Image (cartoon, coloured by chain):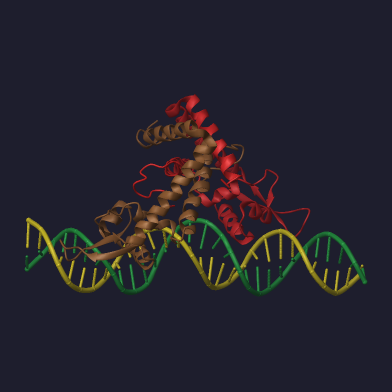
Chain colours: A red, B brown, C green, D yellow
Amino acid sequence: MAQDLPEQARNTVSMLGQAYSLLGFQIVDGVVGAGYPQKPSHSAVFAQISPEGSRLSALARGANMTPQAMGELVDELEELGYVERRPDPTDRRAKLIMLTPRGHDCIAAGIATIQGIERRIDQILGADGHAELRRLLTELLTNAATDWSN
Amino acid sequence: MAQDLPEQARNTVSMLGQAYSLLGFQIVDGVVGAGYPQKPSHSAVFAQISPEGSRLSALARGANMTPQAMGELVDELEELGYVERRPDPTDRRAKLIMLTPRGHDCIAAGIATIQGIERRIDQILGADGHAELRRLLTELLTNAATDWSN
DNA sequence: CACTTGATCAAGTATACCTGATTATCAGGG
DNA sequence: CCCTGATAATCAGGTATACTTGATCAAGTG
């Protein structure tokens, strides 16, 4: 983004971006470091997949992308052993994408990593500071997303 | 990133990311909307270029990329009329990348857009809330960047 | 004079998507 | 009951972004 134009040394948006990229990369690093290789784009699958299995087309809609693009992500995750395609018993055209045990482990590693980062934020800001940060972000997201008419 | 793994509905990192992308896109939109077309990657130049002109190699180092890649960005900005290459009087190998008047206007539009967004944040969070958000982010960036030993 | 530095030409890589076309299957109307 | 049209997946190829490495050449430096 154009977040870091000069003479505007530290604006809020730029700080948000820095904080996000600093902490966000640690999530991927943490999960990969725990022995679960993956690409950032794979989270579009992990974030949505249901325990009972999800259809490719449903995942694609939810991630706002084409079924073809989602199919590629699922191909990669299948090769990594995180998901498998099973025939949908209710529709022979469809397949259900389901997490394998290893896929569940990968998600668990992701959650553990995130919790570690949240604890670290607690240490830096204090529990109160962290709660306040979350409150402010929630308020910002709620209002900036809706009435952006000014 | 893997920010949005399930059962972790709203973690802090994910909120930071959402806030950043929500507001960050508005910066590019604002500048482009003001009549200054550009790509997000161009900010790597605008953020660094000095009023007296900067060398390509210096810009590349500062943006942590190769001189070739930076050269391409400068090519594009030159074609858009934001910068020009002038021979460096102190070294005939080098050229100084300098902002044109239109380049200065573009930066001014960026600053104006950012200030508009900052005012909007003031409206949503109140001046005190905004100040508190910035304080928390600063603290987070300072400490998370340095001792990440824990 | 060898070596380094500054810029640039040319081509390649990785990521994250897209459109188009094909095939199998399903759901509703005549 | 079959034909039409929509839907599910997938094969194949394309596009945009943001870089990279390699090679060349002029100009400065010890």
Q: Position of residue B59 (x, y in %)?
A: 29, 55
Total tally of numbered discs in the picture:
0
Q: Is residue B137 above or below residue A67?
A: above
Q: Is residue A115 visible?
A: no
Q: Position of residue B137 (x, y in %)?
A: 43, 35
B137 displayed left or right of B5: left
**Res D26 → quadrant:** bottom left
Image quadrant in which the C terminus of chain A is located: top right
Residue at image position (35%, 59%) is B103
Q: Is residue B125 above or below residue B1?
A: above
**Res B87 → quadrant:** bottom left
Q: Is residue B148 above or below residue C10?
A: above
The front one of A45 and A2 is A2
A29 displayed left or right of A72: left
Q: Is residue B23 visible?
A: yes
Residue at image position (47%, 30%) is B128
Residue at image position (60%, 55%) is A74
Residue at image position (51%, 33%) is B126
The front one of B25 and A65 is B25
The front one of B148 and A10 is A10
Q: Position of residue A23 (x, y in %)?
A: 45, 40
Q: Position of residue B147 (x, y in %)?
A: 35, 33
